Amino acid sequence: MPMPNNGLITETNRQYYQGSQGFIADGINMDFVTTFNTDLVHYSWDPTNAYYSLNNYKLYTSNTGLPGSFVEYVDEYKIVDNTIVFNAAVPVDGTYIVIQLKTVSGGNYGSEDAFGTTVEENYGSYQYVKLVDIVNTFIMAYVGNGKLIPSIKRTDVIFHAKRALQELSYDTLKSVKSQELTVPNSLSVVLPQDYVNYVKISWVDALGIKHPIYPANNLTSNPTESPEQDTRGVETQDTFNNNIQINPPVIEERWNLSSQEFLNNLFQNGSEQDYLSYLENPGYLSEGRLYGLNTQYANLNGWFTINDRENKVSFSSNLVGATIIFDYISDGLAYDLDSRLPKMAEEAMYAYILHTVISTRINSPEYLVQRLRQEKSAKIRNTKIRLSNIKIEELTQVLRGQSKQIKH
């Protein structure tokens, strides 16, 4: 098994920044090997084919190589292991060939760059290493005669590597992802596909400044079931013997109709009559009712709840139409073995896998298991320190206000 080149830059500046690579045909060679860090995705060479738009690149040729002279290549060819293989005919000697990573709409090489997700996802890639490379390197370094692990199945290493990445993602790696969403009239947005837990949700004002939205906690909740009941309080069933559900639940309907000011000022002692009086006269709330306000609920930014019944995030009514930033944690395994992790955490991954493999084997010496456990903990701690990214200038900026009195 070849040793992965984790520490070598294989792309040229042109490949990295423009997402393009060029060749000059010699009239003989039919194969042209690309060296992008990004694998080429090929569905069809024919622009009239519906699958052609799924290619993550476009192929251009030119007789002169001058800007504006490149035209899209539309004759038959194929991509095999990131190699362009021309099937129809050998390109004429001196023909300029350019392959360019693209967005769905593509680009016009020679006059504009096809900047987009295919190119930009590769930016900053040198700081990461793929999980498949971690697995390959671990097998080469730790498995074999005279090593700690005489033999092991590759599938076992993959299992422990995935578990290591998951555990490190929760509290060590920079695994926080974010989405920009708009709150619809339904006051709910679907949880991201790779969602594990939320970190923070904020709404964004006209200046792009984030304002934190807080969880409703004891204010309200989203029931996982809301069965319909008869006059005796017994749950009723449909013709398929399943409980009939009230949708939406009553508590959610009432929450969606609630007023932010009413929640802030009358939540503790408010009644339905108070709410009706507020609707008729909003000034009603300022009539001596702010005294004794519970500051835990004095919030003008709105509230959210995680609706586990529908797997959505639900918001209070004052946030309808608002732009929100949803920061959440993923487990780092959304893309299987193509998952990436920072190179600063590479040694912690090896220590984690080594400890779990040895500790789950029969007759492993206890002193060895304990030594590997201590090494794993130490390397995870070092990784946290490295990834904390503390800069003395930034710390100084924060501490400039340390002399201010903090009121409780």
Image (tube, rainbow, N blue to C red):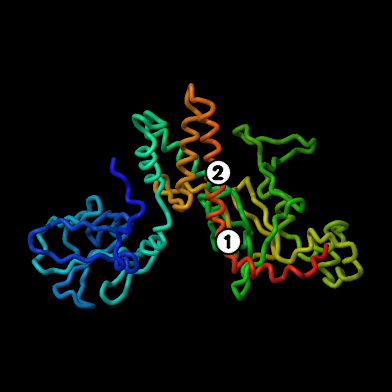
Q: Left or right of 218: which side holds 166?
A: left
Query: Badge 1 local density, few (<14 within 10 Å), some, or many (20+)?
Result: few
Which residue is rendered at x = 84% and y = 58% of the image? Answer: 272
What residue is shown with label 1? 390
Assess whether mark 1 and mark 2 are in contact (beta carbons under 8 angstroms).
no
Separation (CA) of disc 2 from disc 1: 19 Å
Amino acid on which the number 1 mark rests in the picture? Ile
Q: Nearer the viewer, residue 328 or 11?
A: 11
Pick out the residue farthest to the right: 288
Which residue is rendered at x = 85% and y = 72% of the image? Answer: 283
Which residue is rendered at x = 40% and y = 60% of the image? Answer: 121
What residue is shown with label 2? 378
Q: Position of residue 299 (x, y in %)?
A: 75, 64
Q: Left or right of 232: which side holds 197?
A: left
Query: Badge 2 local density, few (<14 within 10 Å), some, or many (20+)?
Result: some
Q: Where is residue 264 in the image (x, y as percent from the top left)?
A: 80, 63
Q: Left or right of 316: which side holds 344?
A: left
Location of residue 245 with respect to 204 vertically, above or below = above
Amino acid on which the number 2 mark rests in the picture? Ala
Q: In which quarter of the image is the C terminus?
A: bottom right
Location of residue 164 with respect to 322 vertically, above or below = above
Q: Which mark identifies residue 358?
A: none
Quarter residue 212 falls in:
bottom right
Quarter residue 119 falls in:
bottom left
Q: Position of residue 41 (x, y in %)?
A: 30, 54
Q: Left or right of 201: which side holds 153?
A: left
Location of residue 185 with respect to 250 vertically, above or below = below
Residue 195 visible (yes or no):
no
Which residue is rendered at x = 61% and y = 75% of the image? Answer: 206
Q: Quadrant of the N terminus?
A: top left
Quarter residue 324 falls in:
bottom right
